[in-house]
Image: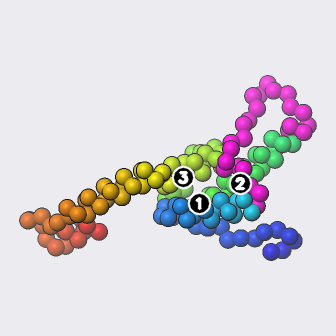
Amino acid sequence: MSDGKLSAKIPHFDGLHYDHWSELMENLLRAKGLCPMIEMDYQEPIEMTVLTDEQLELLQDAKTNDHKVKHYLFRAIDRSVFEQILDRRTAKSVWDSLKRKYGGNDRVKKSMLNSLRRKFEVLEMKDAETITEYFARVM
């Protein structure tokens, strides 16, 4: 830590262990005072809207913070994951997209786990299959 700023390593996300990564990332953003950017989107004003100087400053701060969070998220994720969220406009939309794709909810996770368990339980080598083919299919 230098100059009173928090310096922390950005947690890496490769598409695995989303729950762990998201907790680490959220903690980092909270420590930097940027967590609100993944909790709620900022709204661009309609072009014809006249803003006060204070409103313009708040909007500029929101844009800057949004760009900071997107920067942290983009640095944290693998290229394969990055390509899936590249078109997202705000930090919140990036965060929500990752959460939908990799997080899921408990019911979805249980359903996926049950499906994999059923596939595993009935997994067997086919009659005309070689051991090499079987291992290639299983792995």
Vertical arrangement, residue 27 with respect to residue 37, above or below: below
Quarter holding residue 10: bottom right
First reached walking from the N terminus: tag 2 or tag 1: 1
The secondary element bearing badge 3 is classed as helix
Quarter holding residue 133: bottom left
Q: Which amino acid does label 2 sit on?
A: Cys
Report the residue marked by disc 1: 22
* Drawn side of residue 131 relative to residue 93, left or right: left
First reached walking from the N terminus: tag 2 or tag 3: 2
| Residue 83 seen in the current view | no
First reached walking from the N terminus: tag 3 or tag 1: 1
Q: How is the image coloured?
A: rainbow
Question: Which residue lies at the image location 84% right of the left edge and 74% below the top edge?
Answer: 2
| Residue 35 point in image, percent of width and height | 71, 54
Q: Residue 98 carries which label?
A: 3
> Residues in magenta?
32-56
Q: What residue type is labelled 3?
A: Leu
